[in-house]
Image (cartoon, rainbow, N blue to C red):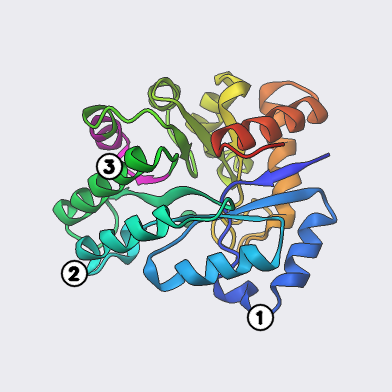
Amino acid sequence: MRLFDTHCHLDFAPFAANIEQQLQSAQQVGVERVLLPATGPENWSRLASLSEQFPALYYALGFHPYFLTQQSLNDVVLLDVQMTERVSRCVAIGECGLDAMVDVPMAQQEAIFIAQIELAKQHRLPLILHGRKTHNRLIQLLKQARFEYGGILHGFSGSYQQAMQFIDLGFYLGIGGVITYPRANKTRQAVAQLPLSALVLETDAPDMPLMGYQGEPNHPKRLPLVLQHLAQLQNKDRQTVADNVWRNSNLALNICE
Ligand SMILES: [Zn+2]
């Protein structure tokens, strides 16, 4: 079984000291590929060098709304340079988007998100989207920009209707630990009904711990558990779901199987 963790912060503190071991323990359970999303210019070169070191790693570069600074809008030009010179393992722009729960003015978040949509258009690259209580606005801005290179809405939680709007825009939905919690009723019901052809798996490690593992950092080796829950919700066998989400992940990021 080949699995792709489409959103994992393997460069973050709990893993940083021994990435090789961490990656091995994920590979042992079938996680063959991992996408590392950027937070901002501070980790761009780290992600590039990690992907050079480990063939399982792909990455995205961009500005995460959490980590924006006064400087960020000026730094978009640096992202343009990075994308112009990018290597094949750099497959998307992100993570980027809007977060209504973070203490960064929404006008600033929108300006830098719109700039990243434009860069993705220019370089014909997919986006790794981050959204918290901002799904409708994300959809509006993507439509206004006539963005058509798709990507992944990471950490999907929400209704079937919201999900279908992203799918109609060419996005895949990143399904993670949320679906392991029975109380996440709305999201679980949505995921049960959504077309499997639009779903990919993610852990968002070290964030988003799965049920049963609260209080410890999440880990890419837990991806098979997300798969298991997805298979249950979709009422399909695990191998079928695994084959589909593997293909979807590579399609979303334009990676050859
Ligand atoms: Zn993330």
Quadrant in the rendering for residue 229: top right
Residue 119 locus on image (x, y percent):
31, 46
Name the residue nearer the viewer: 257 or 171. 257
Q: Position of residue 22 (x, y in %)?
A: 73, 68
The reply to whether residue 217 is visible in this rendering is no
Q: Residue at x 44, y 25 (%)?
A: 170
Residue bearing the label numbered 1? 17
Residue 181 % position (x, y): 60, 43
Local secondary structure at mark 2: loop
Which region of the structure is painted magenta?
128-141
Residue at 46% x, 60% y is 38
**Mark 3, other Cα within 10 Å: few <14 / some 14–19 / many ≥20:** some
Q: Residue 118 carries which label?
A: 3
Query: Looking at the picture, which amino acid does disc 2 mark?
Result: Gln
Cα–Cα gap, marks 1 and 2: 30 Å
Q: Do the residues labelled 1 and 2 touch (CB within 8 Å)?
A: no
Badge 3 marks a residue whose secondary structure is helix
What residue do we see at 54% from left, 60% from top? 207
Residue 139 on the magenta segment = yes
- First in sequence: mark 2 or mark 3? 2
Query: Disc 1 vs disc 3: which is toward the camera?
Result: 3
**Above-or-below relation of 66 to 3:** below
Q: Which amino acid does label 1 sit on?
A: Ala
Residue at the spot 70% in from the left edge and 48% down from the top edge: 223
Above/below status of 36 relative to 216:
above
The residue that mark 2 highlights is: 70
Residue 5 seen in render: yes
